[in-house]
Amino acid sequence: MAIAAITLVCNSCTSSLKEEAYDFMSNDMISGSSLTNANLWVNGCLNTLNGGDYMMWGSYWTDETQDDDYFTGVSWAVGTIGAGNWYGNMDNTWDGPYLLINNCNNAIPEISNMSWGNDAQKNNCLGQVYFLKGWAYFCLVRAFGAVPIFTKGIAYGDSFQQPRQPVMNVYNYAIEMLQKADSLLYDAKDPNYEVGRLSKDAARGMLARVYLTIASSAMPAGTQVKVNGGPATNALPVQTTYNKTAVAGVEGVDPKTYFKLAEEKALEVMNNGYFKLLPYNQIWGNSNVNSKEHIWSLQAAVTSSLQNYIAFNFYGRSELDATGTGLSGGYYYERNHWYDLFENQDYRITEGVPHRVYYYGTWFYYPLSDSAKVRTKAQINNDVTMHYAGNEKYTKGYPCDARLTKFNQTSSPLTNYGDYSWSFLRMAEVYLTYAEAENELNGPTQAAQNALNAVRQRNNASLYPTTDNSVVDFRSAVLEERAKELSIEGVRRWDLIRWGIYLDVMNAIGIDENNLVKSRQTKHLLFPIPLSEMNSNKLISQNPGW
Amino acid sequence: MKVFFIHCKQLRIEKVLRFRCLLISALLLGCFAVVDGVNAQTINQNGEEQAVLRKISGTVSDIKGEPIIGVSIVIKGSSQGTITDPNGNYSISIKGNPTLIFSSMGYIPQEFSIKGHSIINIILAESVKSLNEVVVLGYGSVKKSDLTGSVGLLKSDDIERSEATSITQGLEGKIAGVQVSQNDGAPGGGISILVRGANSFSTSADPLYVVDGIPYAAPTVPQGTSSELQSTNPLSSINPEDIESIEVLKDASSTAIYGSRGANGVVLITTKSGQIGKDKIEFSTSLGFSTVTKKIAMLDGYEYANMRNEAMLNKYYYEGGTYTPAFPAVGYYSHTSLNDSTYNPSPTDYKNGKAAQTNWQDQIFRTAITNNYNFSYSGGNTNGNYLISFNYLDQDGIIVNSGYKRFNINSNINRKLRPWLEVGTNSTFSKTTNTLANTSTDNMGIVYNAIIFTPARGVYDPQYDNVFQPQLWEGASNPYTAVRNTTNLINGLNYFNSSYLQIKCFDFLNFRQNIGLNYSISSRDAYYPVSTATGQSPTNGYAIRSDNDYNGTTSESMLTFNKTFAHIHTINAVAAMTYEYTNYGSHYIQVQDFPNDYLTYNALQNAIAIPVVSSGRGMYSLMSFLGRINYNLLEKYLFTASFRRDGSSRFTPENRWGDFSSYAFAWRASEEPFIKNLKTFDNLKFRISYGSTGNQGISPYATQSQLGAAPVAVNGTQYAGYSDVTWSGPSNPNLKWETTYQFDLGVDVGFLNNRLNLTIDAYQKLTDDLLQNLQIPSSTGFTSMESNYGNVTNKGLDLAINAVILKSPISWVFDGNISFDRNKIGGLSGDQFANSIGWDMNNVFIERNGQSIGAIWGYKSDGFYNSEAAVRADPAYANAPESVIMGMIGEQRFKCLNGNPTATTNSTDETIIGNTCPKYTFGITNTLAYKSLSLSFFFQGCMGNDIINSYLYRMTGDYGFALNMPQSVYNNRWVPENLANGEYSLKPGVNAEWPILSSSENRRNLFSDKEVEDGSYLRLKNINIGYTFNKPIKNINSIKIYSNISNVFTLTKYSWYDPEASAYGSDPSRRGVDLCSYPASRTITFGLKCEF
């Protein structure tokens, strides 16, 4: 009997000690073949973009935007990354893409193993994941240079410790992923395409961006670029001609090959015709989220895990509310020199920058050059209902600054957290990519000028002059147009870097009008690798100077 | 029965199967035993019929001749017996000439062979520290003299004397090798216990608590706001007055029987049960008054105003810009609008009383009152006993709006149903309420708030306090209103039951079935109105309702064998099978945006914002087979061997089962004739033991990969999604036990008629395959992974001394203990860091081979940059812009340790700057008595440990901005030469301890040795004085009145409130952190205890 008891007990051991899970999902629960399950994996990857390592609290948007010649802000809010104090402050720029890559590496085999009889659907799912993985590697390589590549992910056998791969290997891997996405994703014109998701055009636009980055980086040292800027003490920006320095990692690459590829991909998107340049008043604002100007945007919502702090930080809330304290937030903005790049009638400053703001009992105006308008109680912008009251004040810096109304795009303007849809890729960039590539390949042809002017025209700017039309001038004009059009969209720093003029342009400013240190050293060409990675990855080395 | 098994097997419903099978196995063993037990009884009865009955009577008294009530008199070798009446008389019927055993609690038992006597009067000697004291071990008990392991013992008297409101508090400083630390000074606040040093740095260092044989646990504190770290003490729901004794098992010989959970030591708690004799009624009450032991001297209004102005001036002087003093040189009324008549005070206005100032510590601290009531009745006879007790404790905290309440009912009933069958049940129900103050937080804790808040204003300022308006950019709020307006309650309901059935199969064989139930639920009700930082507009009120539940079931089936062979071989053995199943869960609801502050957490549906809701559930189970054998040869040579095989659900089937065993030998040298002949030792025993124990203290499900909800909103439409839960790390199916191998060498010595007793234990522990969160490269998508990795060695010495210095008429007993522990990390492939402290202090604790757990990592301060030339002379600033150089004057300089002076100070300049492990800890208790008067005082302390003072870190970051600062910092700040002769001159720069005051935003806040302080202390923990009236009036047996003072004084260099603070108490890798903790209090208690 005792033996029977013991046998029985032992038989029940296995079940008695089974670990039963109640509150989390495991892979096998969603590995069955169906569009629903495949989408669960895809969405899990997309969700990474909304998370804390990217958009929620601001890592992507702080790290990608704060380090350029035209950006500034309230010094305590931007004084670390904006001032070049990066060590320990750029960790999420590393962690975020790698988190996304891990999620993609989990999703790819899961979706690949499925089959529900509709290959187009399955391909579209895979295409989205490949796109994100490619994009993540592109973000990494331009920020950190040579970085480790995880082709499978640790759950599928990749070693925990990976060495750096040469810069061009990473670019090529990113291109490979984006090309897969290009071949797998739905065309946006396909009736099955879901607005807000990635499309073939997004993959092509992103490929164009990658090719352009490689091409311009590979341009020989000494290539000239003109930039309007200089010491912050100058009332107005001054044009200076800079000579390109060589960009590390792309040695031996033929720039023309890649400009050609960039032009082709940009043209494919332009010719497809689904996404297009829209009139200025149809680009921003809550009703224009996912409009045809925006090829790829963050998909945010006011749900806790999908909201972000972007609108609050870049624009602020309760701007016109004179009952409370008025403006709060809006700590990040563009410098006066950026504002002065524009012609007076350009919508991007008349509409794109708020001119009147209420702050703790007082109305303020911006810019200083509007003082005559204030005195005459003139109309602000093109809005006949908005006029200066005449008692507005001006102070140097916050709240009298060039904040951008493009960031006033949230369905909940009164809360700090909102559903701002960050634009990752816009049609304007595709046009300007085409213009830049065409100029480098064939000079400032009519086609190149048309592409540039398409952007200028819709902003009420004058057309690019056909006189004074050298390759250098056109190149400089396109770069300046990018700075104006794509302001604080995570573009400017990378433009300076890829054209090898970053250090010279930044050091020409010194300390800006908000006491933000703009001077940079060689080490700032690459971001520092986080301490946690340095500590635990024996195969990695720190970027020079950090 | 066979059919039933098959049926059972066929059910294939796992849960049903699991419990049913266990029940069957228990019943089976039971039936088996019952059958044998009945047989045994029959034989006995047959035997008894042959003898003739006669009567024996007598009186039992103590040495003073006082009769002793309730002495048990048992005929040796039988279960027959009687007890003495209130006059000490007894009578008993016997057959033949048996031996009688006289025994009573607190006396040395005596055996008396009758040999024809009919009147036997016995005098029993008191057994103070008697060697015949029974020591409870896991799954059994032994005579103290037969102990082979190292066990620390605390009796109810010792616990009562410390007037502790919780058991764990009562343990502090009382047992060698047991380090007790309060995480927080809050009433009912968390306490952690470390037995013989930390074995590991990732798993919890808490020992296993076993109450009346059943493992005891409680749920963790339900989730509150993200920055709240307060912990509560799970054992605080047990009333210390209900405790009979506490045993702490320290060495592997005693802990190995607890196998996979014994590595951190085992605390066995035995509750009181009724005594044989007259029914007893006891009532006790006490009233305590607590005050904060220390306040920090902060700047007053005048000094604060000057400090702000100086900071502004320094910034202007060194960095340019315009100088606008925070406080004008001459006060004036501002008239920015028609109705505005705000007065802008000058610094001197705070001196002459023209402007209001506030010491905020005075506004949040108070004299707190504690009420404690206990009521119990108990009794028993040879057939059983009972005890029922009630306790009500209402303890206010010294911070306004904080406190602890406990209501507790305890009943303990034991009954002999048949001579061979005994049953018992012991249950405790308690309801506790913790009213939390926001302390132990990395954010805006109330104590921190009171420290930094501007003193230059009144307690209530309508400009700011009508609606919430932060007055400091950090978001600090008026401490007076913040502490009063917040509600933060933790309500606990706890039911604990330990029941048993015991069958005597033979004289030498017992079967026992234990069943334990441990059910508790702990819930949080929190509300932060609009007048607080958390609930301010646009949040508009912030409410949390959350709960954690915990449900544990234990079944233990044991066979105990006890027999002496040939008078010289005694074997005591136990074999058991146990199964534990624990299920836990949680709910969390958080809402905000209330129309007003009326309904709070009681009606969450009134909130406008979308609620944040989450819940969770999990389980774990443990199955064990265990055995122990004690072999006693000639009462001189003692051998113990134990074995346990554990299976845990937390591991994969491949690594599930672990074996743990231990071996011990003790030699009672004092029983050898050649030692006896020395006539020096009353007791001399040498002990040696070796064994292994385990730790399965990882979170359940670490071997399973987890996917978490990751939704998206595509063009406004929300879809579900899933991705890896990154905080739990990648799953590691290879996880296994962490194993501790311990070697212990001990000696027990008694001299001078046992008036001097000494116990010395030396030990060495090696914990291998540490279960820890290994940092992995973040390029994997994760930052850490649970894994078995590295080892920790602890070497130490425990010393305990007990001396009866005086015996009469004044008795004076001295109890002292001191413990040394050194621990060392090994087997890591590289440095690791413990989790951050708060949200911004990263990499503060380093884990490095050859270093001990608790090594502090940071920068070494190296004076100040005293002049512009000094900054320029530093190669790191050779090419720095003018503004940077000027900004560095008067700033802290750090030692360059990376050999690269041209680089500005960075993480490669960090080094080990301290250690939170004490060199030794000690406790000294003196107990004096003269007739009915008793006095005891208890010292306790530790030496050689460091404390991380997070207050200083946080303050130096912003110092010169708007935060108030301690006078000790202000008086030792760096003062520039040009000001040295002016109004602010106090110290020339060269003698400074703290940097220049500056409202510049460019200071880098680096964690350095400036924020690490010596945490050594000696504390007169309490003084207790009592007087007992014996039989003062009819029907009252005794009345005792007493008074107790706790935390009388503390000698320490630590500059802040309490050197005992350890915010992350149970995390061994982050001990010794003062995270704006709840300060310790000094309590004076008056008490009364009556026995009827």
Image (cartoon, grey):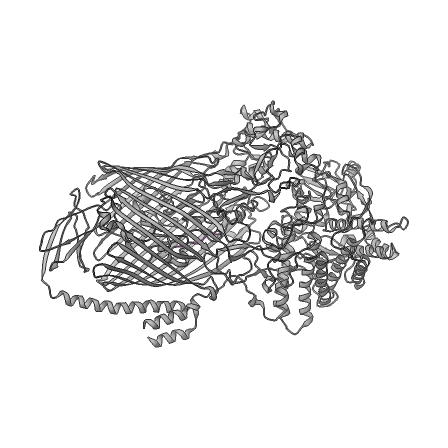
In the displayed orientation, state which residue is furthest to the right.
A467
**What is the x, y in percent for residue B185?**
43, 42
Considering depth in this image, is B127 or B931 the residue closer to the camera? B127
Quadrant in which residue A272 is drawn: bottom right
In the displayed orientation, state which residue is furthest to the bottom.
B3
Q: Which quarter shows the N terminus of chain A?
A: bottom left
Is residue A15 covered in magenta?
no
**What is the x, y in percent for residue B65?**
15, 43
From what the image shows, is residue B265 above or below residue A108?
Answer: above
Q: Main secondary structure of the magenta part?
A: loop
Highlighted magenta segment, given as a residue range: B216-222
Quadrant in which residue A370 is drawn: top right
Quadrant in which residue A373 is drawn: top right
Q: Is residue B367 visible?
A: no
In the displayed orientation, state which residue is furthest to the front.
B674
Considering depth in this image, is A21 or B752 the residue closer to the camera? B752
Is B879 left or right of A279, judged from the image as shown?
A: left
Is B120 left or right of B286, judged from the image as shown?
A: left
**What is the x, y in percent for residue A123?**
68, 68
**What is the x, y in percent for residue B342?**
60, 30
